Image: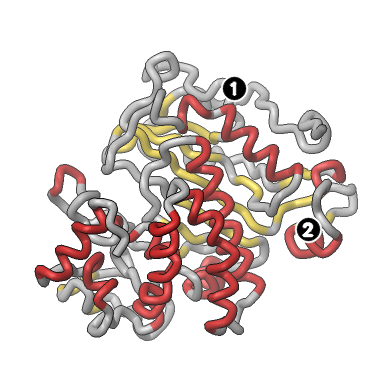
Amino acid sequence: MRNLNNGIDYTPIPDDYPRSDIQGYHGTKGWDKDLAKGGKRYDLRGFTRATINKNLITYANDTYESKYKIGFEIEKNYFHTSLDSRYQNVGKLLELFRGYETDSSCGVEAVTNILPLLPNGIWRTKVYDMMHQAETILDERWSGSDARCGGHINLSVVGWSGERLFKAIREFSGLIQSLYRLRLYRTEYHHRNIGGDFCNQNMNMICPRSEDYSISLRASYRGVERTLSSSRYNFCSQFNNRIEFRVPPRVTSVKCLMLRYQLFYELVDFAVTYEGRVTPQIRKKFYNKVRPIILDMSDGNVDKARTIISDAKYFQKFIDTKGDFRNNAIIKAFINPTRQVDKDRRKRWLNGEWR
């Protein structure tokens, strides 16, 4: 039986800042703990030597650091009343979170610390254990959310710039668009159905440093001018040493967050492993690898999972061709449903018809 008390210890200790109280917007910035550092030999159980070399940095004092890292932003309308006393001591015993903030788009937000992004093993189990301890924040039964809420995901790789990771992950991001296709058009996910688009700019993931990414880029999929270089509402944004996917919707349960952790591990791992040498065969290998995860995310609905996987190649083509969807009916239905046939296809998806 695994003893989670050995190895790295994620038991929270008293802090010198009010981490357990709800702060103002961005009020917890800079409070991150890097929980991807400090792993012990015990935490490596379940890893092969090849896995260790691939996923970890080994230090002279016999401690380890995860090369891949992830952070989540959990937006909610409210936290459970026993926790939210704008209440006090929301995260008193929750090491998962760096802190809690107000959020103008939906209500409140819980921001995680920097987490190790790892394959199956003791160390990943400890991350899952922190998620389970945060159930009253994550689960809809206690802390409610609606379509205005999102679940942004930040990713980084030790020694990589944000630009390098952005380019590498672009090669596999068609799956993310296929999975979260209803977030790519504003109708259902709009704040009171008015105002701007919160996560669907630069959907073809043009690198900000490339010649194609000008101050004013004609976004052909919307037919309007967009100023993308300063946009905070990109499908995926790059920063100095990380990237952020804004597209994932609200987190509804511990299982929901665990499955996202699994999926984005595979995404980062394939992007890093096959950097600069992605082929259709490699993408097919990636789709096969994540198929069980997508099935779980689809609540066991085989038809829905199959459609998400099979449509990923169309969304990937949209990314690869820098936004060209003229002969792509799947894309039109979810990015620019101007014709009735496109609107009908989108409506069928909303109604649970996966074709």
Considering the numbered disc 2 on the image, is that residue within a helix, a strand or a loop? strand
* Residue appearing at x 51%, y 36% in the figure: 254
Where, quadrant-wise, is the N terminus in this rendering?
top right
> As shown in the figure, which amino acid type bears the numbered disc 1?
Leu
* In the image, residue 109 above or below residue 83: below
Which color mode does the image show? secondary structure
* In the image, residue 270 above or below residue 102: below
| Whether residue 319 is visible | yes
Q: Nearer the viewer, residue 17 or 284?
A: 284
Q: Position of residue 260 (x, y in %)?
A: 51, 50
Can you identify the residue that label 1 sits on? 93
Q: Residues within 10 Å of mark 2 (few under 14, many from 20)?
A: some
> As shown in the figure, which amino acid type bears the numbered disc 2?
Ile
Residue 110, picture quadrant: top left
Can you identify the residue that label 2 sits on? 57
Q: Answer yes or no: do the residues labelled 1 and 2 have beta carbons within 8 Å?
A: no
* Residue appearing at x 46%, y 35% in the figure: 253
* Residue appearing at x 66%, y 49% in the figure: 116
| Whether residue 236 is visible | no
Q: Residues within 10 Å of mark 1 (few under 14, many from 20)?
A: some
Q: Earlier in the sequence, mark 1 or mark 2?
A: 2
User: Could you tell whether 56 is left or right of 60 in the image?
Assistant: left
Q: Nearer the viewer, residue 349 or 264?
A: 349
Residue 168, picture quadrant: bottom right
Where, quadrant-wise, is the C terminus in this rendering?
bottom left
Q: CA distance from mark 1 to mark 2?
A: 29 Å
